[in-house]
Image (cartoon, grey):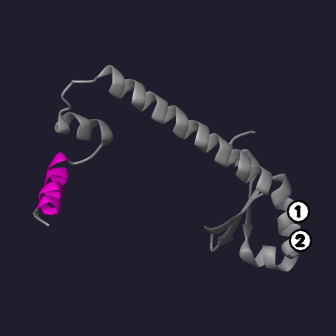
């Protein structure tokens, strides 16, 4: 498959309505259709085959991330994790995490 830009057609809802559902669906069999309203994407019509392929790739990616995390966790058994360092790597505010932990603990 190519990039998203090569696989999509932007179509105003009014045009899709005039052409009819059959035309929108037949276009979606060939490439993803982004239905727009005043230039803003409001819906996506896609083929079941492409959706299944996207889901398969997402599952593979999730499995890879989990496999990596398990490997890292196993490799770092006994290693102490620094909350500030972890939050920094994840782009999170460690003080907000601490505040949330205190609020949760107080319940």
Mark 2 residue crowding within 10 angstroms, few (<14) / some (14–19) / many (20+): few
Up/down of 93 relative to 105, above or below: above
Say whether residue 102 is magenta. Answer: yes
Magenta segment, which residues? 94-105
Which residue is located at x 71 percent, y 53 percent?
51
Say whether residue 94 is left or right of residue 56.
left
Q: Quadrant of the N terminus?
A: top right
Secondary structure under the numbered disc 1 in the rendered image: helix
Which residue is located at x 75 percent, y 50 percent?
50
- For the residue pair 79 and 86, the one nearer the viewer reads as 79
Up/down of 31 relative to 56, above or below: below
Labelled disc at residue 26: 1
Labelled disc at residue 22: 2
Estimate the spatial distance between the alpha carbons at disc 1 and disc 2, rounded to whole Å. 6 Å
Q: Position of residue 17 (x, y in %)?
A: 80, 79
Secondary structure under the numbered disc 2 in the rendered image: helix
Q: Quadrant of the C terminus?
A: bottom left
- For the residue pair 96 and 37, the one nearer the viewer reads as 96
């Amino acid at each position: 498959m190519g990039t998203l830009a090569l696989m999509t057609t932007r179509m105003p809802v009014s045009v899709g309505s005039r052409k009819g559902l059959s035309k929108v669906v037949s276009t979606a069999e060939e490439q993803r259709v982004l239905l727009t309203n005043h230039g803003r994407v409001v819906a996506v019509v896609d083929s079941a085959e492409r959706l299944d392929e996207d889901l398969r790739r997402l599952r593979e990616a999730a499995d890879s991330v989990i496999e990596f995390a398990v490997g890292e966790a196993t490799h770092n058994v006994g290693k102490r994790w620094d909350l500030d360092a972890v939050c920094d790597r994840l782009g999170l505010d460690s003080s907000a995490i601490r505040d949330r932990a205190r609020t949760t603990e107080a319940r």
